[in-house]
Image: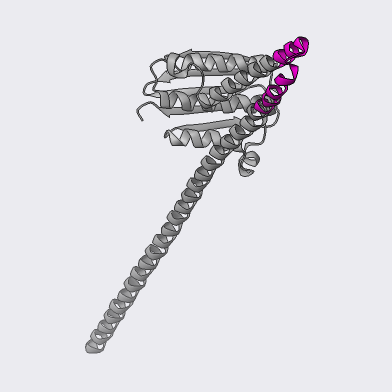
Amino acid sequence: MAQSSSVGASVDMYVMIIGGTIMLFLLASGIIIFMVLYQRRMLEHRMSIQAAETKHQQELFYGTLEAIEGERKRLARDLHDEVGASLSVMRLLVNEVATFAEKPSELEKSSSKYKTIIDNTIDNVRRISNDLLPQGLEEFGLEYAVEGLCEKIMDVSDIEVRLSRKDVKNINNTISLAVYRLLQELLNNAVKHSEASLIEINIRKHNSDLLLSYSDNGKGFNFNEAYQKRSLGLKNIETRTKVLNGTAKFETRPNAGLKVEIQIPLSQ
C-alpha cells in the first residue's frame, strides 16, 4: 500500500514537471511571439515615419523648385511686359525722329515722350533689380532693408505696418537676405489676400538665434486646408526656413488673422 502511494506521488511529480515544462514553453513561446510582433510593429512604424519624412522632404524640394520657377517666370514677365515693351516703343520713336527733322514742334513732342518712356524704363529696371537684390541690404544691413520694405507696403496699400527690431546688426548677408525674403512673402500675401489693416513685425536676436514674429488682423484662413492645397506662399516660407535649419510655426483660423513665428540659427 505504501509502495502504491509512492508510485502515485512519483506520477504526480512527473505530471507536474511535464505540465510546468509545457507551461514554461508556452510562456516562452508567447514572449517570443509578442517580441516578434512588437518588433514588427515598431519596424512598420519606423518605416511609416521614414516614408512621411521622405514625402515631406520631396514636398520641400518641389516647393523650392516651384518658388524658384515662380520667381523666374515673374522676372521674365516683368522684363518682357515692361522693359521689353518700353524698348519697343522707344525704337518706334527713334524711327520717327527722322520724319520730324523739319517739324521742330513735333520733334519736341516726340522727345518729351521719349524721355518719359526712358524714365519709366529706368524705374522698372531699378524695381526688378531691387527684387533680385534688395536695395541697401549689403551696404546698410537687414534693418535698413526691412524698413524700406515696410514703407513700400504702406505706400501701396492701406495697411499700417508696425516694425520693432533689436540687435539685428552684423548679421551675415545670407541670413539677412533669407529673412528679407520671408518677410517680403508674408507682406505680399497680406496685401493680396489678408484684408488686414494692421501688421506687427518683430525681429530680434535671442541667444544664438534670430527670431521673426509676424501678426496681422486680417481674415485668416484654415491652415490645414491651405497647406493641403499646397499654397505656394506657405510652402515658400517653410522651404526658405528649412534651408537655414530653422523652424516656422503658423497660427491662424478664419476671422482670426495670422501669426507666424520663425526661428533661424545664426551659426550656419
Q: Which sits in the foreground, 88 or 104? A: 104
Q: Please state, as top left, top right, bottom left or bottom right, where the N terminus lies in the image.
A: bottom left
The percent position of residue 230, horizontal first and vertical second, equals: 61, 42
Q: Is the magenta stretch mostly helix, strand or loop?
A: helix
**In this view, 248 is above or below 93:** below
The percent position of residue 122, horizontal first and vertical second, equals: 60, 19
Can the viewer see residue 168 in this picture? no
Q: Give the range drawn in magenta.
A: 86-113
> Is residue 251 left or right of 104 when viewed as pictured?
left
Tell me how the rendering is colored. Answer: one colour
Residue at 43% across / 23% down in the picture?
Answer: 210
> Is residue 260 left or right of 13 when viewed as pictured?
right
Residue at 59% across / 32% down in the picture?
Answer: 75
Q: In which quarter of the image is residue 229?
A: top right
Can the viewer see residue 165 in this picture? yes
The percent position of residue 126, horizontal first and vertical second, equals: 57, 20
Q: Please state, as top left, top right, bottom left or bottom right, where the C terminus lies in the image.
A: top left
Q: Quadrant of residue 183?
A: top right
> Is residue 261 left or right of 103 when viewed as pictured?
left
Q: Which sits in the foreground, 156 or 162? A: 156
Residue at 33% across / 69% down in the picture?
Answer: 28
**In this view, 235 is above or below 21:** above
Residue at 73% across / 13% down in the picture?
Answer: 107
The percent position of residue 26, horizontal first and vertical second, equals: 36, 72
**In this view, 47 is above or below 96:** below
